[in-house]
Image (cartoon, rainbow, N blue to C red):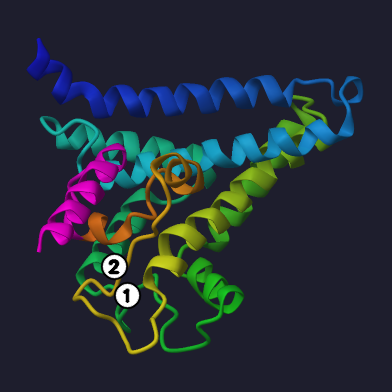
Amino acid sequence: MRNRWHQLRGLVIAALVIVTWLGSLVGLLSLPLASLPVWLWPLGTLWMTFLYTGLFITAHDAIHGTLWRRHRRFNTWIGRIVMAVYALLPYDRLRDKHFQHHKTPGRMQDPDYHGGGDSRFVPWYLHFMRNYVTVGQLVGMAAAFNGLLYWVRVPPANLVLFWAAPALLSTVQLFAFGTYLPHREPEGGYTNRHHACSNDYPVWLSFLTCYHFGYHLEHHQYPNVPWWQLPRKRQQAQQEAASL
């Protein structure tokens, strides 16, 4: 029984993220905003941003086959579905680029790298987004927005605050804590072959900022470890360093 639970934990955690995102989205899109204080609206946006980031992290774990290790094809289908509802991102293209990132992190061939151009946050973010966003995706998202607005009759303020804005803000969150901070070149140059570092946030803050994706060196060292096990790898690495 314990072994079966160990095999299914990743799937259960992924299901929890997806169900929480879906339930929150349906509830917030139907929420009568006029009955709530305006200061509460941004809280809903931040909550959905966090859940959209969780969707992407779930697809990221699917790329590494950690949702259900015994059925790798299942990971692919879950990843495709999650990326479709996240922002119509083509999962297979994302998977190929992510494996290239792991192969050549922080180098010219890395699709997540700034490519030798401007390494400041905004220019690097825009370069990063150009590698993943397609015209077809933008057209599809515009069509989905208008479909929800005119056919489903979702109020426009709800759509912007709890659907469009969180999806966009989550890309900033993912870039900041999963690419920019871990992979920007430190003074004196990179010190490991992964061209990566990890933050020193406590576990609770690491979870809130980006589902432990900021423990990024550990992710590159152990790419087949799911996001929720990265704190343990981080702790082990710290203990080993302290014992030297």
Per the image, the residue denoted by label 2 is 101
Magenta segment: 221-244
Q: Quadrant of residue 16?
A: top left
**Residue 225 in the figure: left or right of residue 19:** left
**Residue 156 in the figure: left or right of residue 135:** right
- Look at 42% across and 89% down and name the residue there: 116
Q: Which image quarter is the N terminus in?
A: top left
Decide: marks 1, 2 in contact (CB < 8 A)? Answer: yes
Neighbor class of circle 1 (other Cα within 10 Å; few <14, some 14-19, many 20+) is some
Residue 110's tag is 1
- Look at 20% across and 22% down and name the residue there: 8
**Residue 167 in the figure: left or right of residue 78:** right
- Judged from this view, the residue extending furthest toward the top is 1
Residue 234 colored in magenta in the image: yes
Residue 199 colored in magenta in the image: no
Q: Which image quarter is the C terminus in?
A: bottom left
